[in-house]
Amino acid sequence: MYDLPPLNGLRAFEAAARNLSFAKAAAELHVTPAAISYQIRSLEDKLKVKLFRRLNRAIILTEAGALMYPGVKSSFEGLRRAVDRIEIPARTDNVVIATISPHMAAKWLVPRLTLFIERHPEIDLRIAASNTTVDLTTDKADIAIRYNLGDNDGLVAEKLMDEAVTPMCSPALLDGDQPLRTPADLRHHTLIHDETLVRHWPGSSGWSEWLTLAGSPDLDINTGLHFDHSDHGVDAAIAGSGVVLGRRSMASRDLEQGRLIAPFDLDLPFRGGIYSVTTRAKAANPNVQAFRTWLREEATKMQMAASGSSETPSQSA
């Protein structure tokens, strides 16, 4: 018999140590930060040793915690591998459940779905538009389409596309009263801010980074329109409300069809990319395979269309 602490406590410790955050561990395990803190304190009481140093706005592993973490992490990975050996695809019908962020669903996936339906009318595709982390080992989702840094240990992940941002606007702005010819001309236009970019450039909307890259760091970026959903900023630019620092992947259809233009030959790349992610067991499901294949083809077509555009930056990520 194994004399081990409670599994919930070890699971909370592994998630908190990996993320170095009680809040992120709580979101991952679908509990409150208070519950994570309680489980770890109970574990520390059981072991009679402190595992974390709790700072004002952060946590770090103690020497004991750092010694314990690799073994706990490898043990959970071993459990996952053991389950994967016997796990069969959860779906025995033609249902495929895909989770994707709401803005990517609205601007990238949904406009293309007719093509998938025409090719695979036998598949009952269900879209769960959410930013919530989903456990792919359950029936809540068969495949996730997510931006990440490529950290998909233990899963079957395929990079669909790189991601980058560049200024985008309605074609009408190019030849209006204040023609948009150089980055310096942005001073005459309303800047549209995508607030979700803050996680890629902390403390900034991304505009300051792009303008520095473009050689115009002195432009005032403190005014303009602000949106906390990326697709809303893109739609505002299409309507002629200003210039958005838009995501290439999300705005690809609008760029292809001329509703938007990217007037400058300069992209600011993200560090990661957009991936399709599933489990090894679900990757064996023919319906999931069909959807993953179609996603790959659509992403490839999008990048080929972008590379063939005269407005595609040579520095595109």
Image (cartoon, rainbow, N blue to C red):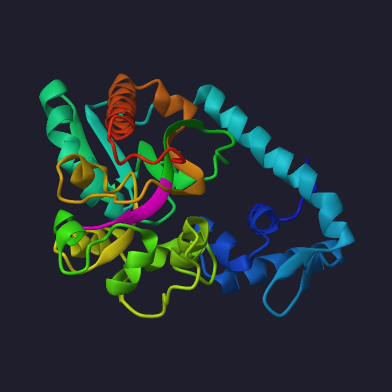
Q: Residue 138: give x, y in percent of width and height.
A: 41, 41
Q: Is residue 132 at all visible to an observer of this figure?
A: yes
The residue that appears at 21% across and 68% down in the rendered structure is: 178
Corner quadrant of residue 49: bottom right
The residue that appears at 35% across and 22% down in the rendered structure is: 285
Q: Nearer the viewer, residue 14 or 290?
A: 290
Q: Is residue 127 at all visible to an observer of this figure?
A: no
In the depicted structure, whether residue 127 falls above or below residue 37:
above
Task: Determine if the magenta segment contains residue 167.
Answer: yes
Q: Residue 77: give x, y in percent of width and height.
A: 65, 37
In the depicted structure, whether residue 57 falls above or below residue 170:
below
The residue that appears at 28% across and 73% down in the rendered structure is: 188
Corner quadrant of residue 137: top left
Q: Nearer the viewer, residue 256 or 174?
A: 174
Task: Determine if the magenta segment contains residue 296.
Answer: no
**Helix, strand or loop: magenta stretch:** strand
Corner quadrant of residue 25: bottom right
Segment tinted magenta in the rendering: 164-169
